[in-house]
Image (cartoon, rainbow, N blue to C red):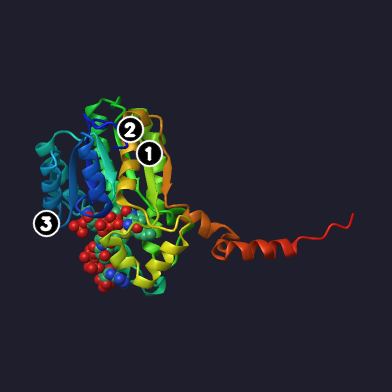
Amino acid sequence: MTFQKDLLAGQNILVTGGGSGLGRAMAERFAALGAGVAIWGRREAPLADTVAAIESAGGRACYATCDVRDPEAIARALDAVEDAGGLLTGLVNNAAGNFLSSSEDLSANAFDAVVKIVLYGTFHTTQALGRRWIERCNGACDPTAHVLSIVTTYAWTGSPFVLPSACAKAGVLAMTRSLAVEWATYGIRANAIAPGPFPTDGAFSRLMPPGVAERARASNPLGRFGEPAELADLAAYLFAPNAGYVNGECVTIDGGSWLKEGGEFAAFVDHPRDELKATMAAMRPKKTR
Ligand code: HXC
Ligand code: NAP
């Protein structure tokens, strides 16, 4: 265990998209660390399966089906999980939609589908729960009140072929930094995590053709993809009582990938190092004095 086992005791955390992939990994980790968890998604089967797994491991969990594009469904699902599992103290905006497409080929509906899940869904869920917190705590929320949003490194670099997702994740990052200041008045923190590639079915089936996945793995500075458990531990830390001064931050967990892609001479690291050193030495001006 990275943490003491009751690290998140007393917290009750909603994870949107918690029935699969990284959302499920976070929900399971939070529950193992003593939090109650609530999970949302559109499909009932993965939600029920995740709740059963958490309960059989001794944790507390409940679910509600919800399409986060629909503010009325969000209100109903908040009521459902607070009735079943108690008042929520934390939120992970993890639900997302994405696919590869040339931007010139996107239909209006295709752009909407992604932006409405990622940006609108995150805003509507955060606002609906934030309003409840502000009303309940009369402007002085417990320091565990925390909104964590899962973005991605191309929220700030942009990326070809995933333009709706890049636009939406950039918006979620701006929302995080805006609320970190605005809602700190109420004791509510807002942070983000920017993962690099983590091999989940949802992401890789849509975004990583087999050959590309191998190249992405090989070109990562650490030579590997992330493990969902590593991301779940980072998220758990951000919900821990001792993280109470971390606010408005976006923590990257990508093995150094975006820095490598972004550096002017980063591609040099793919050359054999001895050859590269010999080339650089040959380029060095000879001493004349
Ligand atoms: C072009 C596409 C498309 C594609 C759908 N559309 N897939 N256009 N290329 N591959 C278009 C459709 O034709 C339609 O437009 C519109 O988008 C809506 O499609 P629907 O299938 O009706 O939408 P819906 O059932 O709501 O599904 C939403 C979805 C789907 C986003 C399209 O992929 C989904 O449910 N995704 C959820 C899970 C997910 O995406 N996980 C990955 C997260 S990974 P028209 O005009 O025809 O009506 C991630 C991080 C990646 O975000 C970072 C990796 C490093
Ligand atoms: P995933 O398994 O496909 O997760 C997406 C989840 O969102 C699913 O559980 C899905 O459930 C839910 N969802 C989608 N649309 C929804 C909607 N309209 N309403 C409610 N729930 C909805 O993929 P993942 O890789 O774990 O992604 C999790 C998060 O990490 C996302 O925010 C993603 O952008 C981010 N991320 C992932 C990677 C990666 O490499 N895996 C990299 C960077 C960022 P339903 O389909 O049942 O609704």
User: x and y percent of residue 24 in the render?
Assistant: 22, 50
Which mark identifies residue 188? 2
Gap in angstroms between the C-alphas marked 1 and 3: 33 Å
How busy is the neighbourhood of tag 3: few (under 14 within 10 Å), some, or many (20 plus)?
few
Quarter placement of the C terminus: bottom right
Q: Residue at x 41, y 62 (%)?
A: 217
Q: Secondary structure at mark 2?
A: loop
Query: Residue at label 3?
Result: 45
Depth order, front residue of 169/243 = 243
Gap in angstroms between the C-alphas marked 1 and 2: 8 Å
- N-terminal-most mark, 2 or 3: 3
Gap in angstroms between the C-alphas marked 2 and 3: 32 Å
Mark 3, ligand 2, within 8 Å: the answer is no
Image: 288 above or below 31: below
Specify the quadrant of the image occupied by residue 33.
top left
Nearer to us: label 2 or label 3: 3
| Quadrant observed for ligand 1 in the rendered image | bottom left
Which mark identifies residue 179? 1
Depth order, front residue of 152/270 = 270
Q: Amino acid at mark 2?
A: Ile
Q: Secondary structure at mark 3?
A: helix
